[in-house]
Image: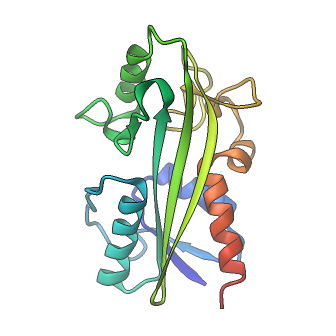
Amino acid sequence: MKLVFATNNLNKLKEVQEMLPDSIQLLSLEDIGCSDEIDETESTLEGNANLKAGYIKNKFGFNCFADDTGLEVISLDGKPGVYSARFAGEPANSENNMQKLLVDLENKTNRKAQFRTAVALHINDEKFLFEGICKGEILRMKQGEKGFGYDPIFKPEGFDQSFAAMSSAEKNTISHRGIAIQKLVYFLSNYK
């Protein structure tokens, strides 16, 4: 089965490719000749995931899935949430986003947070949604060299290291995206 993953994030593409069975041929936006920038204009993770998957399905005709992920921090009323990738403003980059978050949490004792991923699948004429959540906390300083985004400052519940200090295999079994993709893979393996 061929499926397009509607992302320009090569780290995400690699991470998801490692989770899929050989029966699913993952195509990137580059593979299908899409260089369009798909703006995430919805106010929810689910809305953005559906927007991206729908754009590819409608314009290119490929069965497609897309995700949107947000880091939701309890003491910041769920922020940065849907704005996680652009939390610190332009230029949008992980380092600036992490620094802003650490500053915003400087005087907060509650550092509990969760990563939440919504995956939208547009296949044939049907649409499906899958969700993955990983609870944890925001560290006071970066830890680890792997991963991307907020991984160096997010420590999942039950672990003593950040996502960025874990191997990709270890992270993929417990991460928000890993959980959502596992649900997607299970669904696809039973899809007629």
> Is residue 74 at all visible to an observer of this figure?
yes
Q: Nearer the viewer, residue 107 or 179?
A: 107
User: 65 or 2: nearer the eye?
Assistant: 65
Closer to the camera in the image, 95 or 128: 128
Q: Classify residue 94 as left or right of residue 91.
A: right
Q: Position of residue 160 (x, y in %)?
A: 74, 23
Residue 77 rendering spot, x and y as whole percentages: 41, 31
Quadrant location of the N terminus in the rendered image: bottom right
Taking 4 as reference, is 114 above or below it?
Answer: above
How many discs appear? 0
Q: Quadrant of residue 17?
A: bottom right
Q: Is residue 45 found left or right of 123 in the rendered image? A: left
Residue at x-position 39% and y-position 20%: 99
Q: Residue at x 70, y 34 (%)?
A: 166
- Residue 191 x %, y %: 66, 85
Q: Which residue is drawn at the image coordinates 41% and 54% (left, top)?
A: 45
Q: Residue furthest top?
A: 107
Quadrant in which the C terminus appears:
bottom right
- The answer to whether 138 is drawn above or below residue 108 in the figure is below
Q: Residue at x 32, y 33 (%)?
A: 87
Please tell me in which quadrant of the rendered image residue 154 appears: top right
Q: Quadrant of residue 111?
A: top right
Outermost residue to the left: 90
Colour scheme: rainbow
